[in-house]
Amino acid sequence: MITVWGRSDSSATARVMWAAGEAGVSVERRDWGGDFGGNDDPAFRTVSPPGRIPAITTSTGFSLWESAAIIRWLASRHPQAGLWPEDPQARWQAEAWMDWSAAPARAVGAVRTAYRRSSPDPAEMARSVADAVDVLQVLETRLAGRAFVMGRQLSVADLALGVAVHRWFRVPPELEPPRLPALADWYARLCERPAFREHVLEKVSVRPQRVGG
């Protein structure tokens, strides 16, 4: 049995839950972090030294923290899911995309911060959208002619990037984010996947997103 410690609307927790779903792994999730607290709990700090969510524990006593590391662990433990590319060189490329996923997460996070202020600054919003587009254009170029980041099959690279891109597509239309067609097509394919719908679409940024709130 695997226990995931983290609240369901956390983007990092959501991508771990999505990965578990794609791997066909049954997990128990416990609300943790945010309004639920627990980050500074001494026992939790032995599992996640910085007190960050998500973290996992298993019935054998194994524990792990950081969502990207957990995704790698799940993919390695359940090779039948095919989440790692078979070619060794492609696997290293997938690792690189996973590490790079922090860049779009930060960029989209800056957009969210700008439009959610009580008195949003139009210049800040426009600047943050432009900066995010610059980052996401890297993924747009990569996805041109590809179903998924590494080719025809979903992989750990998609799992690392999908939640941040989901939040990008939740940006209020008033910000006039430019259309990135390859990114939009990839996101539509992710939305067809049951585990993505369950753990991302139905949990993360589900409330109406609006400027000034």
Image (tube, rainbow, N blue to C red):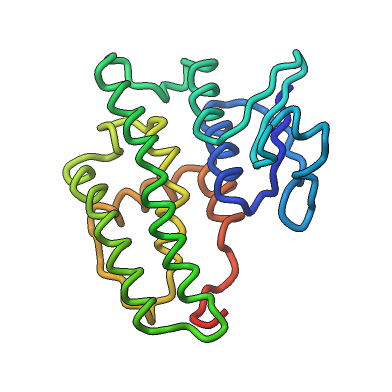
Determine whether 193 is above or below 95 in the image: below
**Total count of labels:** 0
Q: Is residue 146 left or right of residue 205?
A: left
- As displayed, is residue 18 above or below residue 177? above
User: Measuring 57% from the left and 83% from the top, which residue is drawn there?
Assistant: 118
The quarter in which the N terminus is drawn is top right
> The C terminus appears in which quarter of the rendering?
bottom right
For this view, does 134 lie left or right of residue 188? left
Q: Name the residue rendered at 44%, 56% in the picture.
A: 166
Task: Say which quarter of the image contains residue 177.
Answer: bottom left
User: Which quadrant holds residue 110?
Assistant: bottom left
Residue 45 location, x and y as percent? 75, 34
Apparent side of residue 59 relative to residue 204 in the rendered image (left or right): right
Task: Write the residue at 54% across / 23% down.
Answer: 74
Whether 61 is drawn above or below 65: the answer is: above
Q: Position of residue 80 (x, y in %)?
A: 47, 16
Q: Is 211 situated above or below 192?
A: below
Q: Nearer the viewer, residue 200 or 106?
A: 106
Residue 171 place in picture, x, y as percent: 43, 69
Name the residue at 58% across, 46% down: 199
Residue 211 in percent (x, y) is at: 49, 81
Apparent side of residue 143 relative to residue 127 in the rendered image (left or right): left
User: Which sits in the foreground, 33 or 1?
Assistant: 33
